[in-house]
Every structure is written in structure tokens, then in C-alpha cells.
Image (cartoon, rainbow, N blue to C red):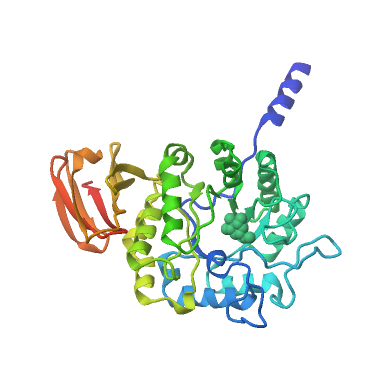
Amino acid sequence: MFLFSTLAFCFSTSVIYGLDNGLARTPPMGWLSWERFVCNINCADDPENCISEKLYMQMADRIVDLGLKDAGYEYVNIDDCWMEKARDNSSRLTPDPTRFPNGIKAIADYVHAKGLKLGIYTDCGTKTCGGYPGSYEHYDTDAETFAEWGIDMLKVDGCYADPKEMDTLYPQITTALNKTGRPIVFSCSWPAYQVDSGMQPNYAAIAEHCNLWRNFNDIEDSWQSVLSIIDFYATHQNDLVAAAGPGHWNDPDMIIAGNFGLSYDEAKAQFCLWAIMASPLLLSNDLRNIKPEFTELLTNKEIIAVNQDPLGMMGKRVYNNSGIEIWKRPISPESNAQYSYALVFFNRRTLGGPVSVTMQLSSLGLNNESCYSVYDVFNSSQHEKFCPPNNVTVKVNPSGVTMLIAKIFV
Ligand code: GAL
């Protein structure tokens, strides 16, 4: 009897409780304010672009009106700088009263009425990166507050915290979220801060406790920034691919199509590569002033279907030579351990016009003897049959991509 109870005790204390929300079976899609609107709190001089309830309500309207909701975009996410500079008398976080006069719950009600979901931001340390109150030592209270407000996704940043302590801090937040009983997608910055301080993140633990996690630097509105993220992912792809799957995703940061820094081809390259990487698709742009070609890109059904593929297998770079890269992701349908594939041909050259790339399918690991039905994601009605010994030839614009789908016959 004594032995039994000791064993039972050891067992119960050694069980690690992970996140149990059952969410994000495919990468979350939505909109996030940070890259485009940063910490603009000057509503007096810039009422249209400051961090305020109006901004989030307008973006919710545009997500519906532009057809983004129908394409799968669901979350409207508040980032840093929404708070009052101090907690209230009962130690609760409160929004800035001039910029959020009706409180956060009113925004949640507004977006929920449109069939959308609301995300918010806090920090596991003593302050947010913008200097607002952090959640350190308030994890349970803050999780309860967010649940009461009707929050559906929480991004927890890592400023003003010790990266070495994150292996215990982030799981405490997971537990606090589980305790609320409300399903809230949990976005962590845990590995990003550890990588930055030279540590090797424990991706198995991270994948157990977070639905998505930032690994690397913040995206900015430039091609240079996008390339640096792509390079980080290619360099670390074996660890990152092993960590990703339904319910738990690497997050290379926001989609910036429709802003100022990327050409159309560069925006297309980012979007297609993010689909290969099974990345969350969180747009950070001004949906009130987006050019139609970018909306068309961001609602491309074929690219989104790759991103949202139910197998949830993250892709990686399989070819890299003279400025030409090929990225490949296994997708459905599958049959007898044979997968279909999404292929992105990426031209990093910046001199000259479109480059013609020819590849034998078998050299890319496409060996299914029943062959493949192949098409371009921008021309999905034109399919052609290719078998493993056949060559495919594509033209790829400089700083651009061509994306093909190769489906097995089932
Ligand atoms: C950074 C984070 C950004 C944004 C910003 C807010 O650390 O990576 O995505 O949230 O803080 O201050």
C-alpha cells in the first residue's frame, strides 16, 4: 500500500501538462497590428493609424469586405501598447481609456459578431517590449482577465525576462490558460529570446506548451528582412521541421504584402515560402488601402490550401545552387506513404530577367511511379501529367518564385 501510494505520487508529479486547447490544427490565419502600426499611440495627431479600438474594428470590417474571411483569415490581433501604464487597484491589466474607451470586451463582441476572433498581447517578463506592464507574477490573473474579455489568441512576448528561465515561465502560462477553460491559441516568443542569447531551445517542450512560437528576429518592411528570415529557417530546418505539426507551428513572423517595402514578386515569394513552411498567416498591413493585386495574392486558394494542408507537415529547402533554391512540402492527398508535393522555385538573383529552371522530378524526391498531375498555383485549371524521369521547366522572376503543385493520382 505504501509502495503503491509512493509510486502514484511520483507518477503524478512527473507528468508534464501541456497545452490542451485542441486549437490551431492548421496554422492560424488573421491580421496582427505590429509590423504596420507598431506602437503608434498618438491618436491626437494620427487618429487613423494609432493603436485604438477603431483600428481593430476597421480591420475586422475589411477582413470581411475584402473576402479575406471567406479565404480563411479569422483572427484580429492586438499587439503591444494597448494597455494603461499601470495595473488597476485589483492588479488587473486595463486598456488605455482614451484609445479603448469601451474596453477590450466590446472589441471582442464586435469581432465575434462578424464571425471573427480576437487576439491580444502580453509579456512573460516584468514589462512588455514597449514598456507597459508585463504579466510576470500575474499569469493566473491575466489569463482569467483575457478569458473574461472573450480573447481567442494570446501572444506572450519575452522582453524583461531571463531567457534561461523561459523553460519554466512559459509552461506556467500554459497552465494558467488551461485553467481558464477557454480555448485560447497560445503564441510564444520563447525560442526567439533563447536563440538570441545563444541558447539551444528545447523544441519538444516548446511544441508541447505553445500553439505557435517565434524563432527569430522581428520582420520589417523590407526584402532584406524577409531574406534574413528565410535564411534562418533554411539553416535550422531540421530542428524546425521536426517541431512543427497540427496544433504547434514555427512562426517566421507576419506577412507584409501590401505595405511599402516589397515588390509584387517579393510579396508573392514571401507568401509562397510561408505556405511551404506551414507558417501562421498573420497579415500586418493596412487593409483599408491595399492594392487589389495584393488582396488577390493573399486570397489565392491554392497557396492557402498548401499552407492549411491537413497533414500539417512543414516543408524545407531541398536545392540551393547559384541563387536558385527549391523548397518542397509534402501535402495531401497521400496514398501508401506516397505524398503529393508543393514546390517553390525561388530565384534570388537580382541581375537580368526571368530564369528558366529545369529539374527532373526524381531528383527532387518525387518518385511515385503512378506519376503526378502538375499545375501552377496561378493557373490551376491547366494540369499536365509528369512522371519521375520527366523534367519540369519553369520560368522564375528575379526576387520571385514559381509555385507548382504535384498531386499523386489516388
Ligand atoms: C517584439 C515582438 C514583436 C512585437 C514587439 C512589440 O519583441 O517580436 O512582434 O510584438 O515586440 O513591442
Q: Position of residue 357 (x, y in %)?
A: 19, 51
Image position of 395 (left or right of 329): left
Q: Residue at x 51, y 46 (%)?
A: 248
Q: Residue at x 61, y 63 (%)?
A: 79
Front-most of residues 95 and 115: 95
Q: Position of residue 57 (x, y in %)?
A: 58, 76
Q: Quadrant of residue 91?
A: bottom right
Q: Quadrant of residue 43?
A: bottom right
Quick check: which quadrant has ligand 1?
bottom right
Up/down of 83 relative to 188, above or below: below
The residue most toward the front is: 351
Image position of 331 (left or right of 253): left
Q: Residue at x 15, y 43 (%)?
A: 387
Task: Work out whether residue 1 can be spotted.
Answer: no
Task: Work out whether residue 288 can be spotted.
Answer: yes
Q: Position of residue 317 (x, y in %)?
A: 34, 44
Q: Residue at x 49, y 48 (%)?
A: 249
Query: Which quadrant of the figure contains the N terminus?
Result: top right
Q: Position of residue 316 (x, y in %)?
A: 37, 44
Up/down of 49 relative to 135, above or below: below
Image position of 289 (left or right of 18): left
Q: Quadrant of residue 89?
A: bottom right
- Total marks in image: 0
Image position of 88 (left or right of 190): right
Up/down of 95 relative to 321, above or below: below
